[in-house]
Image (cartoon, coloured by chain):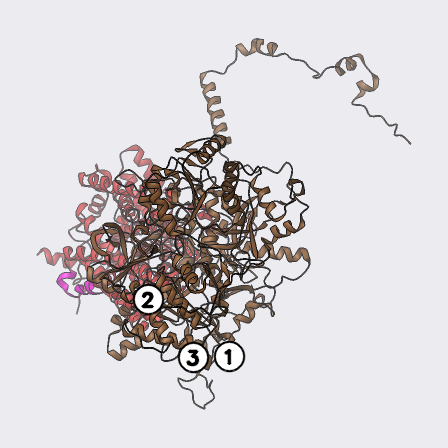
Chain colours: A brown, B red
Amino acid sequence: MANKKQYWSGLDELEGTEAFKELQGKEFPEPQSVDEFLSDERHDSTTSGRRDFLKFMGFSLTAATLAACETPVIKSIPYTNKPAEITPGVANYYASTYYDGMDYANVLVKTREGRPIFVKGNAATGIGAGKANVRVIGSVMSLYDKARLSGPTKNGEPVTWANLDSAMKAAISGAGRTVILSNTIVSPSTLKAISALGVEHIQYDAISYGALRSAQASAFGVDAIPTYDFTKAEVIVSIAADFLSSWLSSTQYAPDYASLRGPERGAQSKHYQFETAMSMTGTNADIRAMIKPSEEGKVASALLSALKGESISNLDSSTSSKVLAAAKALSGAKGKSIVIAGSNDLSTQIIVAAINQLLENYGNSIDLERPTSTHKGNEIAATQLIEDMNSGMISTLITYGCNPSYDMPNAKAFNSGLAKVKTSVCMNGVADETASRSTFVAPDHHYLESWNDLSLRSGRIDLVQPTIEPLFDTRSAQESFLVWSNAENTDWYTFLRRQYNESYTSDSLYSDSSWNSAIHDGYMSVAETKESPDYLATIDTSSASRKVAAVKGGNVELVTYVKATAGAGNHAANPMLQETPDPVSKVTWDNYVSMAKVDMEAMGLNTYFAQEDFASVVKVTVDGKSIELPAYLQPGQKPGTIGIALGYGRGANGENIGQAAFQTGQKGEHLMLDSGLPMPIGANAFPLTTRVDGNTIYANYNVSIEATGNEYPLACTQIHNTYMGRDSVVRETTFDSYLSESTKPKGEASWNMSHRLNVHEDTNHDGVIDARDKTKTGAFDLWKSHPIEEVGHRWGMTIDLTTCTGCSSCVTACNIENNVSVVGKDEVLRHRDMHWIRIDRYYASDFSLEKGEEEGVGVIDSYGRMEDPSENPQTVHMPMMCQHCNHAPCETVCPVAATTHSNEGLNQMTYNRCIGTRYCANNCPYKVRRFNWFNYKGYMKFANVNPAHDSLARLVLNPDVTVRARGVMEKCSMCIQRIQSGKLEAKKADTPVIDGAIVTACAESCPSNAITFGDLNDNGSQVRSISENNRSYHALEEIGVKPNIFYMTKVRNLDSNEA
Amino acid sequence: MIATKLDLTTMQRESSIREPLILGHKTYKDITDDVVAPIMGPASLGWKIMITISSIIAIYGIGSILYLIGTGIGAWGLNKTVGWAWDITNFVWWVGIGHAGTLISAVLLLFRQKWRMAINRSAEAMTIFAVIMAAVFPGIHMGRIWLAYYVFPLPNQFGSIWVNFNSPLLWDVFAISTYFSVSLVFWYVGLIPDFATIRDRMTKPFAKKMYGIMSFGWSGRAKHWTRFEELSLVLAGIATPLVFSVHSIVSMDFATSIIPGWHTTIFPPYFVSGAVFSGFAMVQTLMLVMRKAYKLEDYIHIKHVEYMNIVIIVTGSIVGVAYLTELFISWYSGVEYESYAFINRFSGPYSAAYWTMMTCNVISPQLFWFKKIRRSFVATFILSIVVNIGMWFERYVIIVTSLHRDYLPSSWGEFIPTATDIGVFIGTLGIFLTLFLAFTRFFPVLALNELKTILKSSGESYKNKQVK
């Protein structure tokens, strides 16, 4: 039944009066025209005078001003059409691969709302353990560098791609030689694209391994880098190869090496290191010998002699005895050892090849059938190219993936040659040394914007996929090659796809399931082609031995090395990596000359570096070339030698390679040279290297060094080097004594004895109460254990000091995951680095209080001498972050309860509540709390270093983590955002949180799996079982703060007479 | 037998051998004239010069504070290892100085020490200003001073957010604010009859009106005096425990922590005696200048100085014993962190500060055992400044040397003060001095009505003897 009710607006409508009908047609019942209003006479006689006007003005002005006082509006624009794969707030992960000529890693790229924000190793499908290293993790920052070129340029001026292409086509097809100079290209498709161009292609490597390859070629007939399998290496002898940090495929070696270091399996690999400067690898060695760089070949030769049972000479007694010990260990591990040398001297590498052959390592731990495809650089060809360029024979030079104007030892000659090349084009993404000297720059995509295929070894193709639309008007280098070639009328992606699917058309974008699954996994398996090395070939080492024996050392020998955080210079503008302390020296933002204490004292140089104690600047001269750098005291440095890191001194001619690449002063401003150019960080040490048999030797056997009298501040995150005999901080033992007590319960073994207090009770039941009656300190407690310590989750962590190599991947991963502020050199110098996790590096000291007592040295002097590390010290790396104490000293002292304990065992910070009294930081025994001294994201001092200042670089910030305000305390949250999302996932799946489903950034990035995170209340969790291991202990157990972080006693593979 | 005679008007005995408390043959009118002279007359040139200098310093200090608040705590030299340095040093130093006033007026009142009457007014004023200066530091040392109200247990809209009653910093908030308000009330109550006296003499109408308001209609009736006496006694009773509680609680900022060098049960008595020690020294410094500038030599004379010097010897010796006890316990405990903390104190990078502290606080006050030094204005003035320097270094040593090398050697660092550190500290000295100078100009610096009660109480016959 229809509703027939009627409603009226009033009686007028019901009655239908005329007045109502008239009004119905009008919009306003009572019309009033503006003219009428204004002409109203009453307005003329208004009483508002001048004073009223001013009052109204004042009021309006105040009202308008107050209305403007609002928090700035930050626009967040929703998707008009939401992309199918993006859910705001949910991260997507894409498998990709990192390769920069030096590091190779299978990675997973985390993107949020289309922005890559985190790069980590692809543990699921990566080669080996699928781990990244500190440089790869930090590489995400370089995507958002505003120094990146926004498009192609000609002589520094923007140019269109069309113009550049036509010029390049004309140049290539014109008269004269065209050469492509690149780093080692391991992409099959890129090589095809280059060959489509039909021009000469020369490869070189910033760090050359030519001698290693040539040695394999001459010994076994395969000119390639062997594949080393450290999971099979029970004995490792490294002669100056920093294989955990920078030598060859260190991303693979580090996890493999660590897999044999844990003593629980009843054995432990034994690692001998013979080296000059203290490398990160050297700090992990069981036995480390200090040698001069000129002795590297002699050590190899002596080792070979010792293995053959011959006598050894040419070496001092301490080195010889270590060589003999190494030989003994090696001969007991035939086929299960690896001997490597970092030297690029052919004779040394031939001897090393002979040693490995003698030890039957080839075919077992060393594989030359499936060699590694990196580092194929041809130094002789590159040198010839420079000559040709200088003689005007090259008309067109294309540089791709390399920076020869900076990193060639003879860069000066290259640069003068480059000026003579008619058309030069550089494909680097920033106007770096080479790009700014080239006619054209055709900027390549960042690797996170690119497609590519890479092959580290035969049988497997790793894929690089874009994770973001190109930010700038850049173009894939391969695309450029294809365009310039004319031969291929196709885009790079189609070209790449056709390598694997000849019938590919762009229509089948989503239908090719095998391609899609390869992209998902980040790799595809292809048919393997094996090399056929002759492992049994006779190697004649006599001439090599003669050559190495003839090497003459000088008074001062120089060794150059690659720093873990800087690489060969390509990370110079990365503020995250610049501020990550060097794993050994703990110096940030700088390059220095590492020296032995005796040499520094002889030269009268400063040996203590702190806020107001500056390093002395020294001048190092090689063949008329000299550089000035501060001298840094490096324990473990062979006296009579100095070490300088490569990869510094970038942008020396003011090239715009990124604002973080230059030195900043006390106000954060760029420091300027007298020439008006910004001051580069450190100095370029590539020109100081020498050449032997066409190979670059990264050392110099005779340099001169002199003090300049100048001083220079070095910003170290750690000033004090020893742990002062405090064995409740660091516990370490030898493998021998570990084995003898390996079955004892936790807290009972002599090397991990729980702290005990005397009690007035007969606890040992011997009938008398005396000093032997002790009870574990943990039994005494003012407080009752809280019931929530037993129920629900209790997040905790174990950190194994045995496997931690100090590589600092965790530091950089944590910084990026948690938006930790970069604060710049001046602030680090003031001890204000913001890192939530740091790696404490302690050197052993020769002295102890006990020794002082024996020798009759007073306590004060003993403490003083304990501050000095030994000449060649043993080293411990101890990752240190918030210990999430269950009885946290920080929590009780906060007046406003801004730091509290969660019911899941986390010590949590409430930034909004924090008023910044810093009492918590003072009361933290581990000193892990970090205070926001300034407004890092807004204060001008940090504009040159902190990514949050720049609207582009800001995109790298993790949206799940607050960027902390000035005046609040912050610290490790145990990646609470990851815990929360893991719990939500479990809740959605209606399951308990599965062990391993939640992992913190540090644990995830650790190449050696030294860090394990999990739920201590979960009986089946890995972290629970490790925490119950008898090696586990709490740092500073006796102060009773009951941390949720356990450390595992460090075990060195030493026997009693070596320790 | 000592001759004494009972003065029936004050019910007090007059000693013929004790030194009198007020010298010269003063009449009641003389006292009023002497005390109100600086208020009634024009400002002296010396006062003008002094207040100009102190205001300039004060403005510089306020500028430093504004710079600090505008920039961030990073303007100071603090770092990840040393989270407190000059800020809390200055705080504890000023609170310590603020101890003497209340001790003099309350404790000595309860013990019926009449000599306090000459110094209690300005000592109390010093206390008030010192506590204000002290209160500046916990405020500005906060990273986010604009949220300072979070430390008060205010009902709020944030949910169930409440302050943390476990935190010694919160106890500080209560202790300092209680101490400040009681001291202020006590001081003001004492001023009321004196304001009335000034009101009655004042000829300038505006000033007369102001003093009239401030004197709360005091008419000097017996009823008023009775109430005044009762209230003074009650306030003295309340204030006395506060003298001991404030610095005990301040010391708990350190004592309840776990940092070696801070974690010490001896701290509360040690801090209280240190506070009295430094407070009396500051009273001496100010009083010796004031008596000269305002010609109050007859009221504050060598007897007062000697009494105060005796307090300085006693408290200084207690402090010295506390230092040695700390050293002994650090060795006796056998705790390596504890013993290292103290070895580092006297032999480490900050040993100069430690030995300054030891010299100034332990050795220099022992000179007061010599009567000549104890009864010398010049020696007292110099030593009082030495003691205050020593007490500043004591707090600096406790705070900085304990923090800069604590448990993990990896975190060991150093603290180096910046210009802002120095500016803020000097600035508070300037503000303090400005306030004190203003006080001497507008307030009666001696408790003139109280003084009148002791005019005849002591040594009339002694004085007569002296005159002959």
Q: Position of residue B285 (x, y in %)?
A: 21, 53
Element class at badge 2: helix
Q: Position of residue A862 (x, y in %)?
A: 27, 72
Q: What label does residue A736 carry, if any?
A: 3
Report how far apart the C-alphas of labels 3 and 2 lie in the structure: 41 Å
Q: Position of residue A952 (x, y in %)?
A: 48, 40
Image quarter where the C terminus of chain A lies is: bottom left
Tell me the chief SS of the magenta region: helix
> Within 10 Å of the Cα at label 1, are there few (<14), some (14-19), or many (20+) other Cα atoms?
some
> Within 10 Å of the Cα at label 3, are there few (<14), some (14-19), or many (20+) other Cα atoms?
some
Task: Verify CB contact (< 8 Å) between mark 3 and mark 2.
Answer: no
Q: Nearer the viewer, residue B290 or A937?
A: A937
> Within 10 Å of the Cα at label 2, are there few (<14), some (14-19), or many (20+) other Cα atoms?
few
Type of the residue with mark 1 = Pro
Disc nearer the start of the sequence (3/2): 2
Q: Nearer the viewer, residue A548 or A410?
A: A548
Q: Nearer the viewer, residue B317 or A92?
A: A92
Task: Verify CB contact (< 8 Å) between mark 2 and mark 1.
Answer: no
Q: What label does residue A543 carry, if any?
A: 2
Residue most toward the left?
B468
Which stretch appears magenta? Answer: B361-374
Element class at badge 3: helix
Q: Chain of mark 2?
A: A
Nearer the observer: mark 2 or 1; the answer is 2
Asked if the magenta segment contains residue B364, the reply would be yes
